[in-house]
Image (cartoon, rainbow, N blue to C red):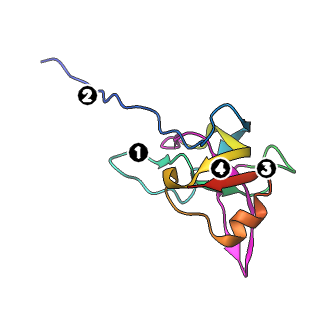
Amino acid sequence: MSKFIKTTYTNKKGILKFPDHYVAIPVTVDDAGVVVVDGKKIVPAGTIVGGGTLTTPATKVKKAVTTTGVSNAEGVLFDDVDVTYGPASGAMVIHGFINRSKLPAAPDAAEVTALKQITFLA
């Protein structure tokens, strides 16, 4: 009996409004707290992330947290990142124009304030 592997082909979800004008840096995405869906732990493209990686590059990024109107947001995750088997490499946009309608969740006011080099457009 042979075993079949199902492969699904889809287009990459683009979060940029203007794909030729952005700056992204390499990051390691933390797997802690990511929920398993269909057997995988995926952090979706467009997730607002932070955690101190801009000052300490070895720090893993995770979903940004806003406390009393202040966010630790540092950037926006460029692509989906699969963290099923632990922390994984990704890219974080730190400068550019992001299409707000492509994000998994709208940024709150504190996140928009923290992301000084990112403009969110409709």
Rounded to the nearest angstrom, the CA distance separating label 4 from label 3 is: 13 Å
Q: What residue do we see at 70% from left, 65% from top?
A: 111
Amino acid type, callout 2: Lys
Q: Amino acid at mark 3?
A: Thr
Report whether 84 appears left or right of 31: left
Q: Which residue is mark 1?
A: 40
* Residue ranking furthest to the bottom: 68
Please tell me whether mark 1 or mark 3 is closer to you in this view: 3
> What residue sits right under mark 4 in the picture?
76
Label 2 SS = loop
Which mark is first along the chain, 2 or 1?
2
| Disc 4 residue crowd, few under 14, some 14–19, many 20+, Cα 10 Å | many
Q: Amino acid at mark 1?
A: Lys
The part of the image, by quadrant, that contains residue 57 is top right
Real-space Cα distance between discs 1 and 3?
A: 25 Å
Chain part drawn in magenta: 60-85
Q: Give the image location of residue 91, x and y in percent.
A: 66, 38
Q: Going from the N terminus, do you reach mark 3 or mark 2 first?
A: 2
* The C terminus: image quadrant: bottom right
Is residue 1 positioned above or below 84 on the image?
Answer: above
Q: Residues within 10 Å of mark 1 (few under 14, many from 20)?
A: few
**Of all residues shown, which one is farthest toward the left?**
1
Label 2 sits on residue? 6
- Cα distance in 3D space between marks 1 and 2: 15 Å
Q: Is residue 103 above or below residue 13?
A: below
Number of the label disc, if any, that sits on residue 53: 3
Front position among marks 4 and 2 = 4
Q: CA distance from mark 1 to mark 4?
A: 21 Å
